[in-house]
């Protein structure tokens, strides 16, 4: 069974990818610190790969 935090992370990253205007910030307020850090790392990696600036 897949960890729900990973599914949520994938859904959130896909949501951001589909935005017409890439956000410069995404505030992560849900999940434990480890899940938030993993989501942050994935968002920053995706932003770099696509040439977007993100904090």
Image (spheres, helix red, strand yellow):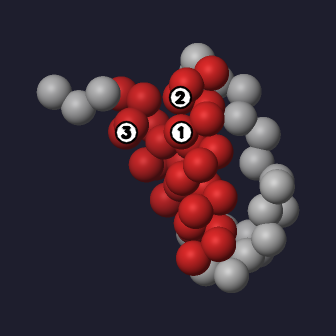
Residue ID for mark 3: 7
Determine whether 31 is above or below 22 in the image. above
Please report the residue visible at 43 percent of the width from the left and 49 percent of the height from the top: 10
Quadrant occupied by the N terminus: top left
Residue ID for mark 2: 35
Please report the residue visible at 45 percent of the width from the left and 37 percent of the height from the top: 8
Quadrant occupied by the C terminus: bottom right
Query: CB of mark 1 within 8 Å of CB of mark 2?
Result: yes
N-terminal of the two: label 3 or label 1? 3
Which secondary structure lies at badge 3? helix
Please report the residue visible at 57 percent of the width from the left and 76 percent of the height from the top: 49
Query: CB of mark 2 within 8 Å of CB of mark 3?
Result: no
Quarter of the rendering containing residue 6: top left
On the question of residue 27 being in view, the answer is yes
The residue most toward the left is: 1
Please report the residue visible at 56 percent of the width from the left and 42 percent of the height from the top: 39
The answer for how far apart the CA atoms under marks 1 and 2 are is 5 Å
The answer for how far apart the CA atoms under marks 2 and 3 are is 11 Å
Quarter of the rendering containing residue 51: bottom right
Which secondary structure lies at badge 1? helix
Nearer the observer: mark 3 or 1; the answer is 1
Nearer the observer: mark 2 or 3; the answer is 2
Residue ID for mark 1: 38
Classify residue 15 as left or right of residue 26.
Answer: left
Determine whether 6 is above or below 48 in the image. above
Q: Name the disc covering residue 10, or none.
A: none
């Amino acid at each position: 069974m897949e960890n729900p935090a990973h599914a949520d992370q994938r859904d959130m990253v896909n949501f951001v990818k589909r935005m017409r205007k890439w956000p410069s910030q995404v505030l992560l307020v849900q999940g434990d610190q480890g899940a938030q850090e993993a989501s942050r790392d994935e968002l920053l990696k995706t932003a770099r790969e696509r040439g977007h600036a993100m904090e």
